[in-house]
Image (cartoon, rainbow, N blue to C red):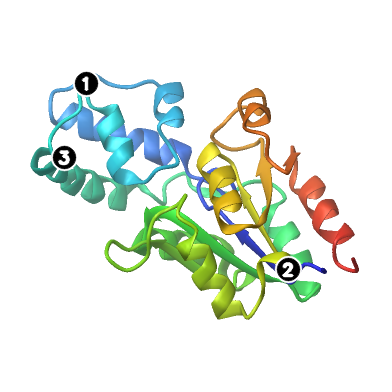
Amino acid sequence: MSVRAVLFDLDGTLLDTLQDLVDSVNELLEKNGLPQRSFAEIRSYMGNGAAELVQCALPQRVGEAELEEYLRQYREIYAKNMERHTGPYPGIPEMLQKMKDAGIKTGVISNKPDWATRKLSGKALGTLLDAAVGDRPGEVRRKPDPQPLELMMEQFGVSPQETIYVGDSEVDIETARNAGLEGIAVSWGFRDRPFLEAERPDHLVDTPDQLWELIAARLNS
């Protein structure tokens, strides 16, 4: 069937958020007298939401109450830092415009907190996206659970056979499989190409132009 909707991960897929995330994690650690983490370490912790990011960055795993306090601090720090360096990867706005011109619905599904997902995607990409949803505890389950993808497909009125999911991590590859969607992994985000190849996505692309070519080839299928 022809593609009618493309759903995206946000961090590492549409937006380069890494520097602001690294700065925020290390500011949290410094504030609490804890050792800093490298850029590469923090990059490897991405994909499973803020709680797992903070838990991984701490010197040792902590209990729920202690983690919640670290998370509270982290959210305050990230809210202050999150628009300093973040922006679309080169070629992303142009690719989304092509999808819009072709009548394809586009949406973001992220494990990032919902308020941050909506704010950053709205500011950076505006009307190029039709919907965005992030982590809403108790309402929307987190990837790799397929529920947020299913909710957005229902909102768009499209079937799994008409939908593609695009992301940059093993979490996204698993999410696409769990939702029964064709999945595309991108190599410009938070995971290296050899790592993604080992996860065996349906497709792996290196540029937004390559991604658009895959989508365009499905428009009249």
- Read off the residue under disc 1: 59
Residue annotated with mark 3: 67
Q: Nearer the viewer, residue 203 or 98?
A: 203
Sequence-wise, the earlier of marks 3 and 2 is 3
Mark 1 secondary-structure assignment: loop
Residue at left offset 53%, top offset 68%: 150
Task: Name the kind of residue labelled 2 in the image.
Answer: Glu
| Label 3 SS | helix
Residue 71 has which mark? none
On the question of residue 14 being in view, the answer is no
Question: Looking at the picture, does residue 17 appear above or below residue 134?
Answer: above
Q: Position of residue 155 (x, y in %)?
A: 55, 79
Mark positioned earlier in the residue sequence (1 or 3): 1
Residue 162: which disc? Answer: 2
Disc 3 marks a residue whose amino acid type is Leu
- Name the foreground residue: 38 vs 62: 62
Can residue 5 be seen at all in this image of the molecule?
Answer: yes
- Percent x, y of residue 116: 37, 59
Tell me which corner region of the image, top left, top right, bottom left or bottom right, holds residue 165.
bottom right
Please provide percent x and percent y for residue 87. Answer: 54, 50
Badge 3: few (under 14), some or many (20 or more) residues near its Cα, within 10 Å? Answer: some
Say above or below: 220 vs 165. Answer: below
* Residue at screen point 60% across, 69% down: 129
Is 81 placed above or below 135 here? above
Mark toward the viewer: 2 or 1: 2
Q: Secondary structure at mark 2?
A: helix
The mark nearer the N terminus, 2 or 1, is: 1
Residue nearest the observer in this picture, 120 or 70? 70
For mark 1, does the 10 Å Cα neighbourhood hold few (<14), some (14 to 19), or many (20 or more) residues? few
Q: Please tell me which residue lies in front, 24 or 133.
A: 133
Question: Distance between the Cα atoms at labels 2 and 1?
Answer: 44 Å
Kindly report which numbered mark, 3 or 2, lies closer to the viewer in this rendering. 2
